[in-house]
Amino acid sequence: MNRIVERFERLRREGKRGLIVYIGAGDPSLAATRQLALAFDGLGVDVLELGVPFSDPLADGLVNQLAAQRGLESGTTPARVLESVAAIRRESQIPIVLYIYFNLLHKYGLERFIAEAARAGVDGLLVLDLPPEEGEAYEALMRQAGLCNIYLVAPTTPEDRIETIVKRGTGFIYYVSREGVTGMQQQVADTIGPMIARIRAHTPLPIAVGFGISTAEQARAVARSADAVVVGSAVVNRIAEHGKNPDLVAEVSRFVGVLARAVKTV
């Protein structure tokens, strides 16, 4: 069974919510990415989302844009990200999703990348700029490789399109809790609960909520409605602050541990 599917099945059986953490691959180095992944696994993170650095990350706010830039500067490429996933797999079975833009897949070769991602130990892809209507070939290759193709639903997505999107997704549905790009926010949107209910009317898949969740209190509040909470920019910001600190992993882990406890105690 795919690790993402297996993890959400376990969470459902245990009556718990999941924590998904996003970091930029190669920020500040791929060695640090591997160390953070192993630390997160020990803290109870349910899914690790690795952003594959791209020069034009249109869905990302400044914090994650800068992480992508640092990743590119550290020499991170799609091939090297897959090598790092394989290195993580030698020590951990944490479910891993690659957050990636389609241009990188196209340049690498879609069939080749998906096959190599599966061999490396990737469990799913979240392709930010691939509309489901244009994803038929991609979805077929993903099914063949046993990977989850994860799609986004936004607050502005109309009802008929929600139905179309969720029928094509696998693993979980990623609900973008606010309009715009990624980034830390002072408060979470008050429409999250009703939107999750609308999405659930069309799919049995778990629903993860992200974009803007920055604190343990916000994560706990969202976990009351969602199956999983995604925290990205707030973690990436701490990596930026401590990137040159030899205690980087310990400093970031301290924050992620607080998030995990908040989500798991709902």
Image (cartoon, rainbow, N blue to C red):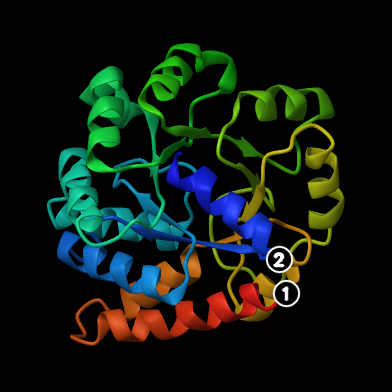
Callout 1: 10 Å neighbours few (<14), some, many (20+)? some
Check the image and report above or below for 123 versus 132.
below
- Residue that mark 1 sits on: 266
Residue at 42 percent across and 63 percent down: it is 63
Up-down relation of residue 173 to residue 234 (above or below): above
Residue placed under numbered mark 2 in the picture: 223
1 and 2 marks in contact (CB < 8 Å): yes
Q: Is residue 58 left or right of residue 116?
A: right
Residue 19: tell me if it is visible. Answer: yes
Left or right of residue 26, residue 146 in this image: right
Residue 43 position within the rendered picture, expressed as x and y whole percent measured from the top left: 43, 76
Pick the front one: 266 or 244: 266
Q: Quadrant of the C terminus?
A: bottom right
Q: Nearer the viewer, residue 142 or 218?
A: 142
Secondary structure beneath disc 2?
helix
In depth, the one of 90 and 154 nearer the eye is: 90
Q: Percent from the top left, x then y, of residue 117? A: 27, 35
The amino acid at mark 2 is: Ala
> What distance separates the C-alpha of mark 1 from that of mark 2?
7 Å
Residue shown at the point (28%, 79%) measured from the top left? 249
- In the rendering, at what x and y percent does residue 54 appear? 30, 42
Q: Is residue 116 above or below residue 196?
A: above
Circle 2 packing at 10 Å, graded few (<14), some (14-19), many (20+), is many
The disc labelled 1 sits on which kind of residue? Val
